[in-house]
């Protein structure tokens, strides 16, 4: 998310700067009042193509041609950069999930930590400290993302479901840590693991 925020701020600043240059240019070169100059800069930048607010002199038209090239280039650059960022993040997300899936499929003698709340985080910290291999399962996307950012294998799923436990290798695991939010879920998980 940091990348998106940085690029969005940079692109917003670039577009705002181009709009300011256009507004000032139309005010100084064409003699437009501030609002009319901003309006003219905006419709030129977005290529809407409405009529000119006031007739332009030759110098005003020359500035308009220059501004049109600069502003449209800035818009294309902004659209391209945001598209690139989104595609890059989606691709990284896909490849990261695929790599994590392969790593989980190769786990043996690991621990399955169900729930990444306070207790689950503490259990994971202990497991990391002793160098044990483990996988976190939680149904909260924020908690799964937090675990992954901490360098842990994590899966977004409901750990009370048998399919989820099979997917994270319950048949190859040393054990399961039940650290879910409610006692009922922990009891249900315990019964599922035993069966």
Image: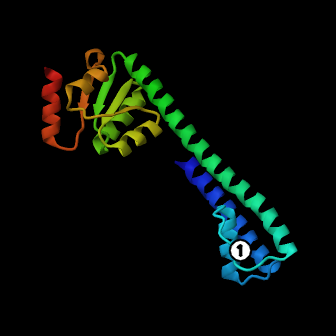
Above or below: residue 53 compared with residue 50:
below
Which of the 4 image quadrants contains residue 11?
bottom right
Quadrant (top left/top right/bottom left/bottom right) for the C terminus? top left
Residue occupying image coordinates x 68% and y 50%: 77
Name the one closer to the observer, 161 or 136: 161
Q: Position of residue 192 (x, y in %)?
A: 15, 26
Image side of residue 135 versus residue 4, left or right: left
> What residue is rendered at 24% in x and 24% in y?
163
x and y percentages locating residue 92 in the rendered image = 53, 34
Taking depth in this image into account, of 98 and 33 the one nearest to the observer is 33
Q: Position of residue 166 (x, y in %)?
A: 26, 21
Position of 13 relative to 147 (above/below)? below
**Left or right of 139 on screen, residue 66:** right
Q: In the image as oriented, which residue stretches furthest toward the right?
A: 59
In the depicted view, which residue is nearer to us: 184 or 76? Answer: 76
Residue position marked by numbered label 1 in the rendering? 52
Q: Is residue 183 above or below residue 168?
A: below
Residue under the point 33% across and 16% down: 109
User: In the rendered picture of this protein, how many numbered marks are placed on residues?
Assistant: 1
Instruction: Using residue 79 as the reference point, say whether residue 1 is left or right of it.
Output: left
- Quadrant for residue 67, please give it: bottom right
């Amino acid at each position: 998310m940091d990348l998106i925020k940085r690029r969005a701020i940079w692109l917003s600043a670039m577009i705002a700067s181009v709009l300011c240059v256009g507004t000032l240019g139309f005010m100084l070169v064409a003699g437009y009042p501030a609002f009319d100059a901003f309006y003219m800069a905006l419709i030129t930048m977005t290529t809407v193509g409405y009529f000119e607010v006031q007739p332009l002199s030759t110098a005003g038209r020359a500035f308009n041609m220059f501004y049109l090239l600069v502003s449209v280039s800035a818009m294309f650059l902004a659209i391209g950069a945001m598209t690139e960022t989104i595609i890059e993040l989606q691709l990284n997300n896909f490849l990261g999930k695929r790599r994590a899936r392969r790593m989980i499929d190769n786990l043996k003698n690991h621990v399955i930590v169900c729930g990444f709340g306070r207790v689950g985080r503490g259990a994971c910290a202990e497991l990391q400290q002793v160098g044990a291999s483990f996988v976190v399962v939680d149904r909260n996307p924020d908690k799964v993302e937090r675990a992954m950012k901490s360098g842990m294998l994590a899966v977004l799923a409901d750990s009370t479901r048998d399919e989820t436990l099979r997917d994270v290798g319950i048949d190859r695991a040393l054990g399961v840590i039940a650290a879910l939010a409610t006692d009922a879920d922990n009891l249900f998980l315990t019964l599922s693991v035993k069966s």
